[in-house]
Amino acid sequence: MAGTNRSLLLAVAGVFLLALLLPLFISGYGIRILNLAFISAIVVIGLNFAFGYAGLITLAQAAFVGCGAYVTAILTTSAGFSPWLSIPLATAFGGVFGVGIGLPILRLKGHYLALATLGLNVSFGIVATNWKSLMGGTDGISGIPALTMGSFSLGTDHRYFYVLWVALVAATWVAWRIRISHVGLAMIAVRDDEIATATSSVDVTRIKVQAFALSAVYAALAGALFAHMTNFVAPDDFALSQSIVYLAMLIIGGEGSIIGAIAGAIIVTFMPELMRDLGSAYMIFFGCLMLLILIFLPKGLLSLVALLGRRFGTARL
């Protein structure tokens, strides 16, 4: 078992290392899409804590992304903060906001929780649209500075790719460490049988809040990175429809799997570009794909790999 797990980790590490070579073979527009895919992957890894591990149906992930994006935008454009300082501050704010929202809202369950988080995302859009003095309203916030290292600018898509690569690798490693920790196991136990977990002296509320806060932390980090890549943020970037897309990414890739979250984010981000010739029929294809996956592969595309993994004794990452 230890040998197969080590082989899996080496294979994943090899994929990440090979990704370093992608900017040599992908055009400018393609690397921008890949950067967006990496940002979405960080968001969906975070969503996996809440939905994949703890079983919390949340439709507020885009709102947390927006929190991170707007906090770093405000700090760098209005308060004069360095982006390298504003990004961790925005990430921390996302965690605090997640805890503050999670404590009351996680008293709800099932579709009631889904509706509450849906309302949270809609409320975020309303606040961002109407609080013009701070958040710019529908005009958004422009002039967000790019990341720099001394006089060396990381503002181009090819250079920013490596920033996002480091962030994604770090996010994946932290998520894996949490997954194999007592906290990660407790999240999965809560998802599988909340009553039995509570009778085992596990604080179910605390575990749920931790999962919700972790999803917010990852989303806020991705939002801050997004803001410094695009140099502009607006309410439409964090609409409810984007939260639904994040959830679709996790379902297509495979809920409860870190690699599934990454794969789903990359697949769904590139799918509109690869099927641009279909025009509006793309949405029909996407809807049919979702239905087929839900019917035949309820654990996502990575369930095929998981089946092979269990056959050969490999743990799921």
Image (cartoon, rainbow, N blue to C red):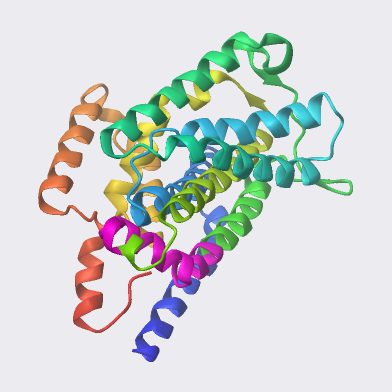
Q: Which quadrant would the N terminus be assigned to in this image?
A: bottom left
Q: Is residue 35 left or right of residue 201?
A: right
Q: Position of residue 185 (x, y in %)?
A: 40, 68
The quarter of the displayed image where residue 300 is located: bottom left
Residue beneath the point at 52% across and 57% down: 22
Q: Is residue 112 visible?
A: yes
Residue nearest the viewer, comparing 167 with 198: 198
- Measured as percent of width and height from the top left, residue 48 is found at 40, 52
Q: Which residues are magenta?
A: 173-196
Residue 267: x and y in percent read 35, 47
Q: Position of residue 136 (x, y in %)?
A: 68, 13
In the rendered view, would you say 164 is above or below 79?
below
Figure check: 75 above or below 22:
above
**Residue 230 can be seen, yes or no:** no
Q: How many marks?
A: 0
Foreground pick, 236 / 220: 220
Residue 174's quadrant in the figure? bottom right
Rendering quarter of residue 259? bottom left
305 vs 255: above or below: below
Residue 273 vs residue 300, the one in the foreground: 300
Predominant SS of the magenta segment: helix
Please state if 302 lies on the left or on the right of 10 as rendered.
left
Q: Residue at x 47, y 65 (%)?
A: 183
Residue 271 belongs to the span the image colors magenta: no
Q: Residue at x 85, y 28 (%)?
A: 79
**Is residue 178 found inside the magenta-colored segment of the image?**
yes
Residue drawn 35% across and 68% down? 200
